[in-house]
Image (tube, grey):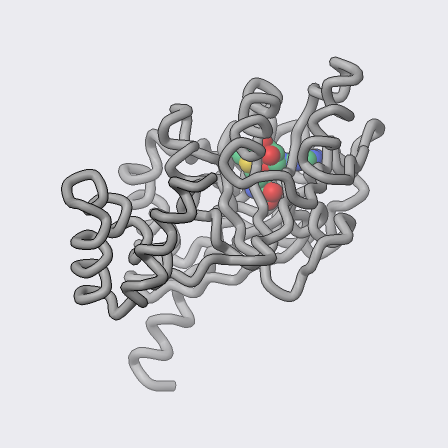
Amino acid sequence: MSEAELKSASRGVLYVVATPIGNMQDMTTRAIEVLSQVDLIACEDTRRAGLLTGHFAIKTALFALHDHNEEQAAGGLIKKLRSGQDIALISDAGTPLISDPGYKLLQRVISAGISVVPIPGPCALIAALSGAGLPTDRFSFEGFMPHKASGRIRALELLSDQTATLIFYESKHRIMETLDLMLEVLGDRRCVIARELTKTFEQFYRGLLSQVIEQLKADEKNQLGEFVVMLEGNQNPVNPAQKIEQVLFERLLQELPPKKAAQITAEITGADKKALYQQVIDRSRS
Ligand code: SAM
């Protein structure tokens, strides 16, 4: 064995372990085995993790690692891994790092040359997509939308020409507001909402976005729980070059006569000057 191999053989492993998103029966046998055998479990919340480990009679010690202490705690965990201890990372539910803490720790663990082994299992976005009936060949996971409405509008505008299926996480506090904004910014398109996946009241709502909003509004109970929102991608995206042409033309129209605005837009973008001018004539007639 080379010196480098000896060094890495004596180091521990960081296991990234997926846990159930509501139904304990979704815990894999490999996840139970790994959590039982490691020296330490780093978790978001020791009380919640304690419910999981208690359920499976796992005796391993728990250590709280959350967004607020991840940076500082990473150093201590890396020391333990370097000394040969194995550590498992779990989150409150589902797959760690997917809209959950762990990214900073993994970056540092990988830079330190320590092995990372994922133990796959439940993940809300994958469960939701697999049952949605929307195209799955290409999808874009967007996680949680920004907190402020203005940030959410901007984020949605940037997604408006995305052709892949869009997937979002959302909480019960903002689900209705977010759906209304989606309708306003992205227009009516096919939507599927997966609520309370793997739990007693699991439900899928399917239809056009406007119809799904009505289904949720029909009963306040439909607005409770955890949600994955999925939208069909844009079926008729605007060519980005055309979009720039149009934005430039509209801006120049605010400053210049239509002929001049059309001429400059055509010079800069190569657009058809006559077609641009025709737009102004058509608008004045309608
Ligand atoms: N790491 C988790 C995963 O693998 O899916 C996601 C954690 S994120 C903090 C929590 C969000 O995931 C919820 O607000 C909800 O949008 C979604 N989610 C988690 N469990 C869910 C469930 N059982 N049904 C529907 N959505 C769920």
Q: Give the vertical position of 279 relative to 213 (above or below).
A: below
Q: Say whether residue 169 is left or right of residue 7.
A: right
| Of the pair 245 and 130, the residue shown nearer to us | 245
Q: Give the vertical position of 286 relative to 32 (above or below).
A: above
Q: Say whether residue 278 is left or right of residue 191.
A: left
Q: Position of residue 128 (x, y in %)?
A: 71, 46
- The answer to whether residue 92 of the structure is visible from this angle is no
- The answer to whether residue 19 of the structure is visible from this angle is yes
| Of the pair 101 and 41, the residue shown nearer to us | 101
Q: Position of residue 181 (x, y in %)?
A: 52, 29
Q: Position of residue 195 (x, y in %)?
A: 73, 32
Q: Position of residue 140 (x, y in %)?
A: 53, 54
Q: Quadrant of residue 24?
A: top right
Q: Give the vertical position of 130 relative to 93 (above or below).
A: below
Which residue appears at 18% of the width and 45% of the height? 257
Which residue appears at 69% of the width and 59% of the height? 135
Q: Quadrant of residue 6?
A: bottom left
| Of the pair 263 and 214, the residue shown nearer to us | 263
Q: Say whether residue 229 is left or right of residue 159.
A: right
* Quadrant the N terminus occupies: bottom left
For ligand 1, which image quadrant applies?
top right
Q: Seen from this angle, which residue lies furthest top?
A: 220
Q: Seen from this angle, which residue lies furthest right?
A: 200
Q: Seen from this angle, which residue lies furthest front?
A: 285
Give the number of callouts.
Answer: 0
Q: Quadrant of residue 66?
A: top left
Which residue appears at 57% of the width and 18% of the height? 173
Which residue appears at 33% of the width and 52% of the height? 246
